Amino acid sequence: MADCMNNHKYLVIKAKGGMGNRMLCAVTGMVYGELTGRKTVVDWRDWTYSNDGSNVFARFFQCPDVFSEAILPREGTVRPSIWANKLDCSVASMIEQYDPDKHSSILIHRKYSVDVREIDYDEDVLVFWYYTQRMRALRGHLRQGKSRFAGLSDNQVIRKVLREHMPLHDDIQQSIADFKARCWRQPVIGVHIRHTDLKTNLVQYERHLRRILEHVPDACIFLATDNKQVNEHYRKEFKNVIWTPKWFPGEMTSMHQNPGCSDRTANGIEALVDMYLLAECDYLIYAGASTFSAIARLLSNLPPNRAIDIQRFSPTIRLKRVIREFIA
């Protein structure tokens, strides 16, 4: 990305939630860092995908434009000011300390993040965090000047950053290639089912899958799920089902931030392998409310008739999106 114009100003991108949430947050922050000419640090120092609380971002992605947290100054002004002398803390720990009853608040980011609609902050260090992407808030800035994102849609900007500036680490890319060499047999129908801490409608998945199989009966089914029972059901119910080896959580408990997971970094790598394999399928069935699914869909080149969002007509999901978009 563009060279930093202001070498003594910094942007720290924090994270909270699962892989999809933090990836979309990182993309937004990286674009914002370029717009503001600040040195950008992606700080994933928490226990979600780390075995020791260290920053695992560079273990997952190769981003030459992103700096280590080690460059952050020991002194200097910070915005929001609540982060002063606390830049080594995670968002989750900060909310637990100051707002323990607001982990699910849709407004809590306002206290712990700068507003990316503004770019002319004077502070030495800015901290940005959000549960998902905020491209709409950056749209006005991207239209101005000679931004290389000018004329691109929000999804096109995100795709460009993910593909060109946030590629997967080499060994993760190799794991994807190795799995495809062993198991891929086109056409492939990708099915992403999150069904532990969040439930989706399993009947809808199967209905859409059977309709596709009527046209491509010998298709391979790539199943990406966090639920062991769902995995076993599909293997019994359908032929040609493939899946990547992974650790499964106990029944109806989250796959990430799970105390039962012995290797959280491996858990993150397994998630990324599934996400990017879904993006390479010839058909995709997913739940659009999942940021994990949304990124897989965004990275794919599928026409609309081959990507089926089982929640696309849900008034509840649509309302939540509108509310989150306009109160951010």
Image: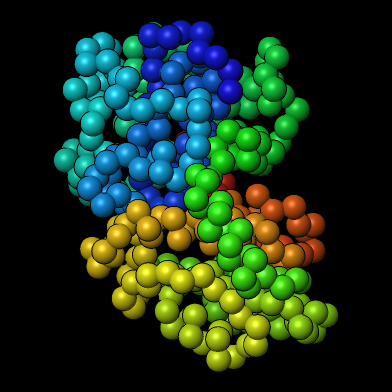
19 or 50, nearer to the observer: 50
To which quarter of the image does residue 75 belong? Answer: top left
Q: In the rendered image of this protein, does residue 34 appear above or below residue 236?
A: above
Residue at the location (74% across, 65% down)? 282
Q: Which quadrant is home to the N terminus? A: top right
Q: In the rendered image of this protein, does residue 160 appear above or below residue 182?
A: above
Residue at the location (43% across, 75% down)? 227
Instruction: Using the rendered image of the protein, determine whether residue 186 is visible from the camera's viewpoint.
Output: yes
260 or 244, nearer to the observer: 244
Instruction: Using the rendered image of the protein, determine whether residue 154 is visible from the camera's viewpoint.
Output: no
- Position in image of residue 272 (x %, y %): 50, 55
- Position in image of residue 172 (x %, y %): 51, 52
194 relative to 17 in the view: left or right: right
The number of discs equals: 0
To which quarter of the image does residue 114 belong? Answer: top left
Q: What coloring was used for the rendering?
A: rainbow
7 relative to 3 in the view: left or right: left
Residue extending farthest bottom = 236
- Position in image of residue 289 (x %, y %): 54, 58
Q: In the rendered image of this protein, does residue 113 appear above or below residue 220?
A: above
Q: In the rendered image of this protein, does residue 60 appear above or below residue 271?
A: above
Residue at the location (58% across, 18% down)? 2
Residue at the location (68% across, 12% down)? 145
- Position in image of residue 246 (x %, y %): 42, 69
249 or 312, nearer to the observer: 249
Residue extending farthest right = 215
235 relative to 19 in the view: left or right: right
